[in-house]
Image (cartoon, rainbow, N blue to C red):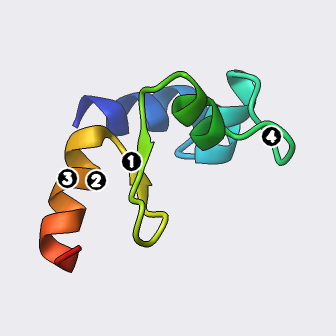
Amino acid sequence: MAEAAVLATRYGNSVVRLLAHHGFNSDISAVDEAEAKGIWSICPECEYRGAPNSVTNHRKKARH
């Protein structure tokens, strides 16, 4: 809920504004940076991307 409140009050409910404020754009990907820093990982079966626990849960649900 706090994330939604910050997005609403600071960025006018715009994820694009949030990303731009932090230096991300169509050439600089937040997802790529998270992966490069080892914060996010990729499912080896289908390229689903997310936090390691999310990828683990995804793999269980997708049965791979």
Q: Are marks 2 and 3 in contact (CB under 8 Å)?
A: yes
Which mark is drawn over residue 50?
1
Q: Residue 61's image quarter? A: bottom left
Task: Give the label, 3 or 1, closer to the camera.
Answer: 3
Task: Give the label, 2 or 4, closer to the camera.
Answer: 2
Q: Quickly name the residue at label 4.
A: 25
Q: Do the residues labelled 3 and 1 touch (CB within 8 Å)?
A: no
Q: Work out whether mark 3 precedes mark 1 in sequence or the reverse, and give the earlier one.
A: 1
Q: Do the residues labelled 2 and 1 touch (CB within 8 Å)?
A: yes
Which residue: 54% across, 22% down? Answer: 37
Q: Residue 22's image quarter? A: top right
Q: Nearer the viewer, residue 54 or 6?
A: 54
Q: Quickly name the residue at label 2.
A: 55
**Three-letter amino acid code at the position of disc 1:** Gly
Q: Distance between the residues labelled 2 and 4?
A: 25 Å
Residue 29, above or below 63: above
Instruction: Name the residue at the right extreme.
Output: 27
**Three-letter amino acid code at the position of disc 2:** Val
Q: Work out whether mark 2 precedes mark 1 in sequence or the reverse, and give the earlier one.
A: 1
Q: Work out whether mark 3 precedes mark 4 in sequence or the reverse, and give the earlier one.
A: 4
Residue 60: percent from left, percent from top: 13, 67
Which mark is drawn over residue 56?
3
**Element type at mark 1:** strand
Q: How far apart are marks 2 and 1 (CA)?
A: 6 Å
